[in-house]
Image: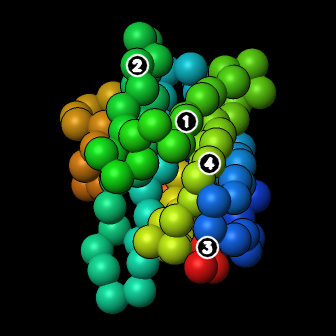
Amino acid sequence: QVQLTESGGGLVQAGGSLRLSCAASGRTFSSYDMGWFRQAPGKEREFVAATSRITYYRYYADSVKGRFTISRDNAKNTVHLQMNSLKPEDTAVYYCAADPRGSGSVTTPDDYDYWGQGTQVTVSS
């Protein structure tokens, strides 16, 4: 069982920045695929960013590329999402997800086994 706890959400004006953090339990965090997803009201959950196990390659949705940066600290079992140049359309609940098995696509929600409770990000215009 992996527990994920997100923090760092809040209200920010357009153009501002926020940094989300996700703390994970487990003794083999370095072998997890870790991802960030978001869900806006009335919309499906969508991929934002991910960092893969082993190679730690980073993946981004086209909508956030160049503005968001995912990073991981294996010594602290944490993954961060630095969000810059925020836009009102970035408003959503952001979720951290973990796949300890590295079983599939890092961009697909169904391939993740564990999810955090979510943190609200609101960007005002």
Give the residue number, with chain letter if any, for mark 4: 84
Question: Dot 4, crowdedness within 10 Å: few (<14), some or many (≥20)?
Answer: some
Answer with mark 1 or mark 3, whichever residue precedes in sequence. 1
**Closer mark to the observer between disc 3 and disc 2:** 3
The image quadrant of residue 55 is: top left
SS at mark 1? strand
Name the residue beneath numbered marker 3: 123
Image location (x, y in percent) of residue 103: 26, 32
Measure how far apart labels 1 and 4 are at the Cα level: 8 Å
Please state which amino acid type lies under the numbered disc 4: Asn
Local SS, label 2: loop
Whole-number angstrom distance, CA of label 2 to CA of label 4:
20 Å
* Residue at the spot of label 2: 57
Lower position in the chain sequence, tag 2 or tag 4 = 2
Q: Can you give x and y, in whole percent of width and height, for residue 32 in the image?
A: 47, 29
Q: Are marks 1 and 4 in contact (CB under 8 Å)?
A: yes
Q: How many marks?
A: 4
Q: Position of residue 41 (x, y in %)?
A: 41, 86
Rounded to the nearest angstrom, the CA distance separating label 1 from label 3 is 18 Å
Q: Is 125 displayed left or right of 48 in the figure?
A: right
Query: First in sequence: mark 3 or mark 2?
Result: 2
| Residue mark closest to the camera, 1 vs 3 | 3
Q: Earlier in the sequence, mark 4 or mark 3?
A: 4
- Judging by the rendered image, the residue that carries numbered circle 1 is 69
User: What is the secondary structure assignment of the residue under circle 4?
Assistant: loop
Label 1 close to label 3 by CB (< 8 Å): no
